[in-house]
Image (cartoon, rainbow, N blue to C red):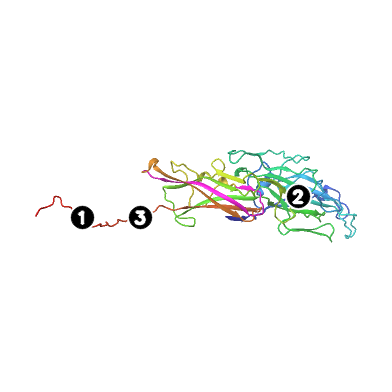
Amino acid sequence: MRKILLLAAATAVFAACTSDEAPVLQNDDAPRAVAFDTYTSSATRSGQTDVMSTTTLHTTGFGIFAFQSDNATYAATDTPDFMWNQEVTWTEPSWIYTPLKYWPNETTQDTQDGAATSTGTDVLSFFAYAPYVAATPGTGAVTATAITDTDNAATPNAVANVGITGLTSNAATGDPKVSYQMAYTPSKSVDLLWGVAPAGGLSYQTVNPDNTINIVEGTPLTNLIKPSKDQKIKFLFKHALARLGMTVVAAVDQLAPGGSIDAATKIYVNSVTITNTAATIPVAGELNLNNTTTPGVAKWESESYTIPTGGLKLVVNSDRGLNEALTGSTTAITRAGVTTSETNVIADGKYFMLIPTHADAVLQVTIDYTVITADANVAGEFAVTNNVITKEITISSFTNNKAYNLRLVLGLTSVKVDAEVADWQLEGSSEVNLPRNNN
């Protein structure tokens, strides 16, 4: 098993108002549009599959929930009364949204010479997810075109709607949440991101020069006060899911991958099955966008989990995403099959997107493969050996924003022949007189 942490980043900027969009008030009290920077941690709406990147973010956009707290801090009793599932879209060269929103001016700004003052301080709290999905405000029900995972419906089952399946409504109090259903078919997998403070944290001076906002890296952007000048509120979008991929490679007459496969022999994969018989990995759940427990760690609500009876089962075969280059016939040598070079098991570099549990995950990995050798002297002219091998592995601390790869190493030992001629074993002699001579 190999773990790869995804670290790439990209930038984008919300549209902001200029000085001629509204009258200038006393000193720094002019209405100022809420403006953002966004970054993606390299990894889509309900209708967008595959790993999220800056390019796909430009295509799908993202959604924002914003809460306004009057002279207070963000609380579980608040509702998203400033923004609810606000769609943000990319129009070169910037991000735009409508209607444009402005920062509250009640900032208790009483130390700046000549500034207007207020009796309290209003704050805004922002929560973001990507990719954006359209939904009904009063219920949070997704109205975007659903992704239906019906490929090879019998193994293990069909799912009517995968990806983002729901949002908390505009009247719901407290933390906004995103409902998610994983796909059993890699090509239908949907990446899910949520926004936090970027690397180095978020730090900016408010309109009050004696007040600086500091938010720890990887934590939610809550209790923000109107910033000074053109300060933008920065989001880092992190992956809320764990990515699982598989590669396969042959080790011929040696322990490590490599060696040389005879030209007359091919190794063809029939299927790979991954099961979590301990029933610890959910297939559906709710992501809380206010990850207050641990910075950078996705807050999945365990009480919302759906765990299949008998545990999660994932199958990759010819009907469900198996790389065609690894497949072949038992009556002809056609494709390359498994070689001594590492090859993706799933076609087109696709992956399973799984809900992380932040605990050890025990998986049983079963590979069904066939070794075929052309030989004109056997019936059918091909010697065929089928193999079904199972191994249990443990992924330590199965965590979001990480890519895991199961490297399947198939050992192939050639049948070696040796021979020698044994000496005759002498057992002595017996005298037989035929006929017997007389004296």
x then y, percent, for residue 298: 70, 52
243 left or right of 77?
left
Nearest to the eye among marks 3 and 2: give it. Answer: 3
Query: Mark 1 or mark 3, which is nearer the start of the sequence?
Result: 3
Instruction: Identify the element where label 2 is drawn.
Output: strand
Q: Disc 3 to disc 2, how far (Cα)?
A: 71 Å
Amino acid type indicated by mark 1: Ser
Q: Quadrant of the C terminus?
A: bottom left
Majority SS type along the magenta span: strand
x then y, percent, for residue 313: 60, 45
Q: Disc 3 to disc 1, how far (Cα)?
A: 36 Å
Q: Circle 1: is it few (<14), some (14-19), or many (20+) Cα within 10 Å? A: few
Q: Circle 3: is it few (<14), some (14-19), or many (20+) Cα within 10 Å? A: few
Is 359 above or below relative to 157? below
The magenta stretch spans which residues?
Answer: 351-376
Which residue matches tag 3? 418
Residue 56 visible in the displayed image = yes
Query: Mark 1 or mark 2, which is nearer the start of the sequence?
Result: 2
Q: In which quarter of the image is the N terminus?
A: bottom right
Instruction: Identify the element where label 3 is drawn.
Output: loop
Amino acid type indicated by mark 3: Asp
Instruction: Give the numbered dot on residue 430.
Output: 1
Instruction: Give the numbered dot on residue 127.
Output: 2
Amino acid type indicated by mark 2: Phe
Residue occupying the far front of the picture: 439
